[in-house]
Image (tube, rainbow, N blue to C red):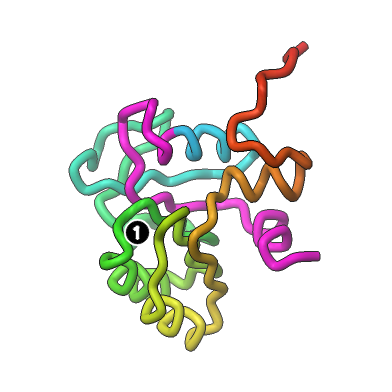
Amino acid sequence: MSDIKNILSKYKSIAMIGVSNDPTKASTIVMKYMQKYGFKVYPVNPSAKGQKILGEEVFSKITDIKKQIDIVDVFRPSKEAIDIAKDTVNIGAKVLWLQLGIKSDEAKKIVEENKIKYVEDRCTKMEYQKHFLKVRQAFPVLQNQN
């Protein structure tokens, strides 16, 4: 089993950093999708703290979440990944996942030194589709939902 498939099979709570109230944003689309497939998603966005996004309370930072977080999923610029990696270690998460286009060698080093898995430049939604639904395109044609 691939590492990514293993991660998405085993871990079901996600702190999603950079989720927006805008339903057209990639982060919000990914959050809604992961919720649909049984993941508990905690939105993290300091400018929306205290609001609700897709029915979930928004946190200012991952260290404010009192529940166990398995995956820290990042929709923020690469330059923010180092501080996020440090917070990922502090909360005892299992995986630091940087979304498409986001990479950081330093963040990778920080989490891997602490036995935390690291994924970069990948979309959780697209990886879930590929490994569990055998779908490869980013936005499959909606199928009859009966």
Report x, y in % for residue 36. Answer: 61, 32
Answer above or below: position of 144 versus 80. above
**Amino acid at pointer 1:** Ile
Report x, y in % for residue 92. Answer: 47, 72
Report x, y in % for residue 21. Answer: 31, 30
> What count of labels does the image hold?
1
Check disc 1: other Cα within 10 Å, few if <14, some if 14-19, many if 20+: many
Report x, y in % for residue 56. Answer: 41, 35
In this picture, which residue range is highlighted in magenta? Answer: 1-28
In-front residue for pair 74/59:
74
Q: Secondary structure at mark 1?
A: helix
Magenta stretch: residue 2 in it? yes
Compared across the picture, whether 18 is left or right of 144 comes to left
Quadrant of the rendered image containing residue 108: bottom left
Q: Which residue is mark 1?
A: 62
Answer above or below: position of 122 versus 83. above
Compared across the picture, whether 94 is left or right of 16 comes to right
Q: Residue at x 66, y 55 (%)?
A: 8
Q: Residue at x 34, y 76 (%)?
A: 86
Quadrant of the rendered image containing residue 85: bottom left
Q: Residue furthest bottom?
A: 113
Magenta stretch: residue 121 in it? no
Q: Residue at x 25, y 51 (%)?
A: 60
